[in-house]
Image (cartoon, coloured by chain):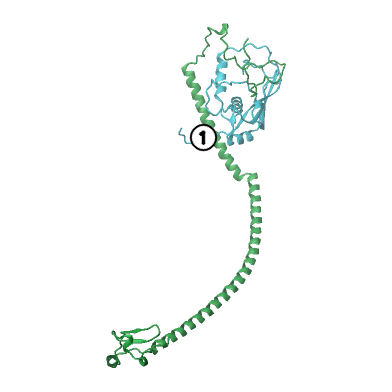
Chain colours: A green, B cyan
């Protein structure tokens, strides 16, 4: 007896777990079993079809497939035309149009609402910006005024200092020559001034010692 | 493969005969069905030696989408085998890209909706060549003359 291989019947692979009393459907001969005696030297008869018949068959099938292909394409194009012009398509088109109009109306109302809100906001903002600009302009004016005052003061100061102009040159030179400034002096911690490069403390009498006291 | 007309992609649907009826009384529904296994698409070139590997019943494939006609295989008292076909729906499904089984293609060819299937012509000249086979059932005798060749 050959071992019962797992069979595939109706896409159920292992049917052995289900108990059934009906006859088991034969799917195929078990793979390991030997060839039957009656089939050992059998040669399967091969149908002979003459060449002209084969050619005729091929011609018929070629023509048929060609025709079917073109027919399918024709049907397809017909279906496309129908889809655009048929009753169902027209109804769909009408419904879509209505829907479109309704939605556009809704959109328009929404837009109006938001436009109103936006206008109010913009008004408030415009006010604020105007105030800001005014304040900044005022500040700017203040600053320029202050600046001008400062410049005036500075110019006054500069004009007050004794500059030597072209006219005063000779006078200034004569003055400078007449009053030479001698920097060769030393100052004590107490403020006594010792002029000249070679003066010593002991040489000057007490009356002439103190000179610079104001700090 | 170069061709002027582009090829159709297979949608998983097929127009075929589903066998109903009972023992010794077949009755077929012409039906548009979803395909789960590789099956009949007669507009594609398949080798004529292709055989089914496992025992398949048509109803085990996907659900029936639409019934598009019927075919009564038993001749009635007037010696007619009645076929009903909804040509509009068949045209719709063919436009969508559904396949067709051989028998359905033959029936539609005989009806005139599609060109004649080569199988009809091949079978006809084979019937003319060979003598008819002996049959157990007697042909029904009625108004129409009985068929000479019971293979048809």
Mark 1 secondary-structure assignment: loop
Q: Quadrant of residue B66?
A: top right
Q: Quadrant of residue B131?
A: top right
**Which residue position holds label 1?**
B7
Q: Position of residue B18 (x, y in %)?
A: 66, 26
Name the subunit of mark 1: B
A52 on left or right of A105? left
Q: Name the residue located 61 percent from the left edge and 36 percent from the top edge.
A: B92
Q: Quadrant of residue B40?
A: top right
Q: Position of residue A7 (x, y in %)?
A: 63, 19
Is residue B83 visible in the rendered structure shown here? no
Quarter of the figure with the C terminus of chain A: bottom left
> Counting other residues with Cα less than 10 Å from the Cα at mark 1, is it few (<14), some (14-19), or many (20 or more)?
few
Q: Position of residue B2 (x, y in %)?
A: 45, 34
Q: Name the residue located 61 percent from the left edge and 35 percent from the top edge.
A: B93
B67 on left or right of A212? right
Position of residue A167 relative to residue B50, above or below, is below
The residue closer to the viewer here, A163 or B47, is A163
The residue closer to the viewer here, A130 or A38, is A130
Q: What number of labels is visible?
A: 1
Is residue A179 visible in the rendered structure shown here? yes
Q: Position of residue B51 (x, y in %)?
A: 57, 20
Quarter of the figure with the N terminus of chain A: top right
């Amino acid at each position: 007896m050959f071992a019962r291989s797992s069979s595939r019947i109706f896409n159920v692979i292992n049917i052995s777990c289900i108990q059934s009393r009906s006859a088991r459907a034969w799917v195929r001969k078990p793979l390991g079993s030997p060839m039957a005696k009656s089939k050992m030297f059998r040669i399967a008869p091969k149908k002979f079809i003459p060449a002209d018949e084969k050619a005729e068959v091929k011609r018929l099938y070629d023509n048929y497939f060609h025709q079917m292909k073109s027919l399918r394409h024709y049907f397809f194009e017909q279906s496309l035309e129908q889809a655009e012009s048929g009753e169902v398509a027209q109804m769909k088109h009408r419904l879509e149009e209505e829907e479109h109009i309704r939605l556009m109306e809704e959109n328009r109302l929404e837009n109006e609402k938001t436009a109103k809100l936006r206008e109010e906001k913009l008004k408030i903002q415009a006010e604020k910006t105007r105030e800001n600009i005014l304040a900044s302009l005022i500040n700017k004016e203040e600053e320029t005024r202050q600046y001008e005052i400062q410049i005036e003061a500075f110019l006054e100061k500069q004009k007050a200092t004794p500059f030597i102009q072209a006219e005063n040159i000779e006078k200034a030179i004569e003055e400078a020559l007449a009053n030479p400034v001698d920097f060769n002096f030393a100052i004590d911690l107490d403020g006594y001034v010792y002029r000249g490069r070679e003066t010593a403390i002991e040489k000057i009498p007490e009356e002439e010692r103190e000179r610079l006291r104001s700090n | 493969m170069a061709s002027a007309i582009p090829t159709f992609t297979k949608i998983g649907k097929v127009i075929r005969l589903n066998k109903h009826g009972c023992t010794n009384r077949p009755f077929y529904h012409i039906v548009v069905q979803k395909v789960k296994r590789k099956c009949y698409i007669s507009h594609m070139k398949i080798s004529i030696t292709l055989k089914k590997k496992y025992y398949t019943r048509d109803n085990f494939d996907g659900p029936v989408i639409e019934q598009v006609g019927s075919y009564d295989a038993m001749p009635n008292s007037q010696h007619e085998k009645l076929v009903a076909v909804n040509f509009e729906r068949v045209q719709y499904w063919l436009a969508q890209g559904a396949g067709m089984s051989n028998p359905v293609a033959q029936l539609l060819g005989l009806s005139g909706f599609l060109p004649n299937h080569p199988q009809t012509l091949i079978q006809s000249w084979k019937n003319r060549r060979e003598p008819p086979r002996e049959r157990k059932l007697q042909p029904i005798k009625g108004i129409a003359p009985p068929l000479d060749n019971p293979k048809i």
